[in-house]
Image (cartoon, rainbow, N blue to C red):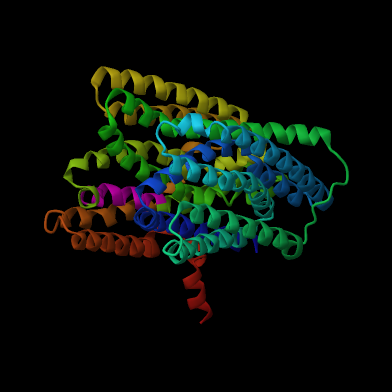
Amino acid sequence: MAKHEVRNGAMLSYVLIALNAILGLVVAPYMLRTIGESEYGVYKSIGALTASVAVLELGLGGTMQRYIAKFNALKETKRAENFSAMGLIQAGILCFVMLCVCAGLFFTLDGAYGGTFSAAEMHRAKQIFLVQMFYVSFHIFENFLFGVISGHNRFVFSNSVKIIALLLKTILYFVLLPLISNALVIVGIALGLELLTITVEFLFLRFGIGQRIRLHKWEGALFRESFMYTLLLFVQSLVIQFNGNIDGIVIGAMIGTSAVTLYSFAITIFNMYEQCAMAVSNVVLPTVTNQIHGGATAKDMENTVVKFGRAQWIFLGAALFGIVSCGREFFILWLGKEYLNCWYLSMILIIPVTFPLVINVCLAMLKAKNLLLFRTISMIYAVVLNILLTVAGTWLTGEYWMAAIGTAASTIIGSCISMNIYYHKKLGLPVTRIYLRIAKRITLCLLLASLPCIALNFVIYGSWFSFVLKVAVFLLVYALGLLTYGLSPAERESLPFLKRGKKA
């Protein structure tokens, strides 16, 4: 069952990413039209403020997933129950801290926004803030439960709940906003669905999985170890968030808002590309933990990295080669010719990050072995390098290109070179051989799929019809290439539609 959970859970993760992207493009302009620019601006401003408080959540969900997976692998049911209770206590403390911080921020709203918000807007801002305050505080418990359920390898349920909640939220927006056109409806829907999700996840954990949350005894040493793990996840999350924002901050300060707008579209594509990789990496931690505590050899772990890495490369490779062969036309159609540089910026950002993304199962191994310190240090000095290159390069050239080059260089040094050496030294993984095994045959299929699209660019170009046609040709040639040559026999046999065909 675990095997199907990982595969189907990853597929549902891709569905969730696609739905978030599509619905985001549809819902945001609908909200703007329905509640008005003023109300929407207040909602987004308060949302950004409360989102900054949400970092106090630390990395509790990831910690719960890692330790519950470990105790399941060791068949220590009682310790899983006990650690869940300790985690729930930690969630309660964090919730209380968040409520206190939010209460303090509430009384600063007049000073922070009084000069820009009207009296009516300030009144609405305070109402929205109070609702959002409870939302971000209760989200800690949802994150806690999601981590415990994921630690049990039940990704189909957890991702299905998120998809259903997203669809319900969208439907409620379209039903209720025309009747009550204000932002309180938006945050009220989010809070209500969050409470419903917490209830459903708790019931599933108790009756679907059969795990209790029961404190048998306080394990001080385990709590200190897990809290250090949580702090490292928290620091990594802060570094990632800061690294994602630094380019826009520097460009805005040194060049101007128009350059920030252009660069932000490249970052949007870059973020979507990274999310595709997370769909697989987010579901492999319990599998890797079981292998490590089950006495898997170095060769077994290498095969695991290759197996999931090839699954990553199938999707990431399609996105990368699709952007190279069809991306120029897409950016012109999507944004206009004046934003064509977004295409080049996207490729500068995407190509280097592909290398760590296709083997990010190694990160799950570090989590399973509690070896996150070096990665945290590596991420910190990579961010420092990015800041130096971005600030110096942008100041000297007056162009946004150095921001992308700085991010790419820091990725190569921090995530590619440093981490690959660490994977080789600490985990005993032959990284070069792993990359070659991941790329084997699949890369040739990607090249063959790109050629007809590049050729078609000289024949038909500049309309959504021509773009969709090229994407269809790319996907058709790529799929045929994978089925006839790119996939190994074992990989072909694991495909659900081929299994059904065999049974028939």
Please state the horizontal and vertical placement of residue 400, each as a whole percent of the image: 28, 29
Residue 139 or residue 431, whichever sits in front: 139
Q: Within the image, what quadrant is residue 371 found in?
A: top right
Q: Is residue 315 left or right of residue 284?
A: left
Whether residue 213 is visible, yes or no, is: yes
Identify the residue at the far front of this view. Answer: 119
Prevailing secondary structure of the magenta residues: helix
The magenta stretch is: 316-329
Identify the residue at the far bottom of this view. Answer: 504
Count numbered badges in the picture: 0
Q: Is residue 486 left or right of residue 73?
A: left
Please state the horizontal and vertical placement of residue 7, each as a whole percent of the image: 55, 60
Whether residue 296 is visible, yes or no, is: no
Residue at image location 46% in from the left, 37% down from the top: 432
Q: Measured along the vertical axis of the image, is residue 273 above or below residue 240?
A: below
Q: Measured along the vertical axis of the image, is residue 469 above or below residue 49?
A: below
Q: Measured along the vertical axis of the image, is residue 130 above or below residue 259?
A: below
Residue at image location 69% in from the left, 55% down from the top: 152
Question: Which image quadrant: the N terminus?
Answer: bottom right
Residue at image location 70% in from the left, 62% down from the top: 204
